[in-house]
Image (cartoon, grey):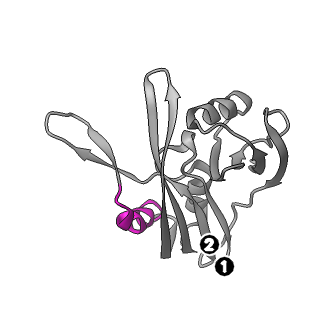
């Protein structure tokens, strides 16, 4: 299956739920997106996207390569929403809580443990983003990560990058991009 990565110059709304609704309405299959800058949205989907979205002034699509070899060194970067489920008294299920910024490198290493050996991680707290939905507000904490890894299982790594890492994937978190080191 071909995966496309599209860079949009888009004056997108600040509401992450509105971005999610706009993309979900136009795309099918697994869609991941990130907003690394005010007028830039990166979209990974099964089809290219662009001019059919209102407010997009420019776009460029390319296909994504998710094929590596064991031992290959890569640089990963992206925006994630690291959380952990904690069981609280009186509840039958765990409650998702943000991972402290200092613990994000260990969280990322755990998430990728079946696919790659993480050799270094830089972390930047990007703050919270808010969206409005029927039930009220959705709040997602974005954390920028930049990591060097060595591929241990190419198929598992491809699955992580295709499906996203962590929670908040519909709201601009989870998309990791890979490049050679």
- In the rendering, at what x and y percent does residue 144 appear? 53, 61
- Is residue 154 left or right of 105 when viewed as pictured? right
Q: Nearer the viewer, residue 62 or 40?
A: 40
Which secondary structure lies at badge 2?
strand
Up/down of 28 relative to 167, above or below: above
Please identify the quadrant where the C terminus is shown. Answer: bottom right
**Label 2 sits on residue:** 75
Query: Residue shown at 64%/50% (left/top)?
Result: 35
Q: Nearer the viewer, residue 26 or 140?
A: 140
CA gap between label 2 and label 1 equals 5 Å
Q: Which residues are magenta?
A: 99-112
Residue 151 seen in render: no
* Numbered disc 1: secondary structure: loop
Q: Are marks 2 and 1 in contact (CB under 8 Å)?
A: yes
Which residue is disc 1 drawn over?
A: 181
Question: On the image, which quarter does residue 138 sit in?
Answer: top left
Residue at 47 percent across and 64 percent down: it is: 114
Residue 122 shown left or right of residue 46 in the figure: left
Measuring 43% from the left and 22% from the top, which residue is drawn there? Answer: 135
Q: Residue furthest left?
A: 89
Going by the picture, which residue comes out furthest to the top?
A: 134
Dividing the picture into quarters, in which one does residue 24 lie? top right
Dominant secondary structure (helix, strand or loop) of the stretch shown in magenta: helix
Depth check: 180 or 135 in front?
Answer: 135
Badge 1: residue crowd in 10 Å (few <14, some 14–19, many ≥20): few
121 shown above or below 157: below
Q: Is residue 135 left or right of residue 49?
A: left
Asked if residue 63 is among those painted magenta in the image, a careful observer would answer: no
């Amino acid at each position: 299956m071909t995966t496309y990565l599209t860079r949009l110059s888009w004056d997108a709304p600040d509401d992450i739920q509105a971005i999610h609704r706009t993309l979900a309405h136009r795309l099918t299959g697994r869609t991941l997106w990130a907003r690394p800058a005010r007028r830039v949205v990166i979209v990974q989907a099964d089809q290219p996207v662009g001019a059919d979205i209102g407010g997009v002034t420019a776009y460029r699509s390319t296909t994504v390569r998710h094929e590596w070899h064991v031992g290959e060194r890569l640089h990963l970067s992206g925006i994630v929403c690291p959380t952990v489920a904690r069981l609280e008294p009186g509840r039958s299920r765990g409650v998702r809580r943000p991972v402290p910024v200092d613990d994000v490198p260990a969280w990322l290493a755990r998430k990728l443990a079946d696919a790659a050996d993480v050799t270094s991680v830089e972390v930047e707290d990007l703050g919270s983003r808010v969206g409005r939905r029927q039930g009220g507000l959705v709040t997602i904490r974005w954390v920028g990560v930049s990591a060097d890894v060595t591929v241990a299982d190419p198929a598992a790594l491809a699955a992580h990058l295709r499906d996203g890492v962590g929670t908040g994937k519909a709201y601009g978190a989870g998309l990791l991009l890979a490049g050679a080191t």
